[in-house]
Amino acid sequence: MSSLRSPLGRARGWGSTGEGSHHWWVMRLSSVAMVPLMLWLMFSLAALAGADHATVTAWLAFPLNTALMILAVATLFFHANMGLQVIIEDYVHHAGLKFATLIAVKFALILLAVTGIVAIFRIAFGS
């Protein structure tokens, strides 16, 4: 089977954008990281079902839970950013609209991630 890629592109593993498999690997690594984090979150929330506010805030104030929750939020929004970037690049064909959409999505996801992490810190530190 013949390839449409250049010999240099085949040797480096790059696609047409020069990014190559880096984006693919980062998506897979963030997916792998999310599996234990989301399992931990689901089991933790199931264990906290029916708990009062004080119990949940005490649980989140525990340093390991605070760190894992921050990692879960950061990984989730990072993975969402990477996935939405691929979707926008594949389906938005107008260059200006593509650029504006990528920037808007990136800013929105950063704002949401920072808001979530600040909320976790405020709960964890009782302010």
Image (cartoon, helix red, strand yellow):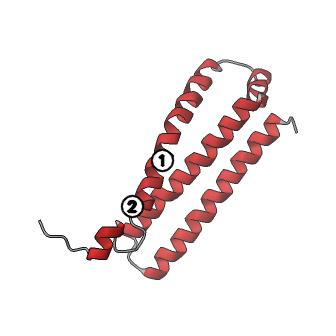
- Quadrant, the N terminus: bottom left
Mark 1 surroundings: few (<14), some (14-19) or many (≥20) residues within 10 A: few
* Frontmost residue, 42 versus 78: 78
Answer with mark 2 or mark 1, whichever residue precedes in sequence: 2
Q: Is residue 59 above or below residue 107?
A: above
Residue matched to label 2: 21
Q: Indicate whether 75 appears above or below 98.
A: above
* Amino acid type of the residue tagged 1 in the rendering: Leu
Q: Position of residue 36 (x, y in %)?
A: 53, 33
Q: Residue at x 76, y 47 (%)?
A: 118
Dividing the image into 4 quarters, which one contains the C terminus?
top right
Residue under the point 80% across and 35% down = 124
Residue at screen point 80% across, 36% down: 123
Q: CA distance from mark 2 to mark 1?
A: 12 Å
Q: Which residue is mark 1?
A: 29
Horizontal relation, residue 100 to residue 14: left or right: right
Q: Secondary structure at mark 2?
A: loop
The mark found on residue 117 in the picture is none
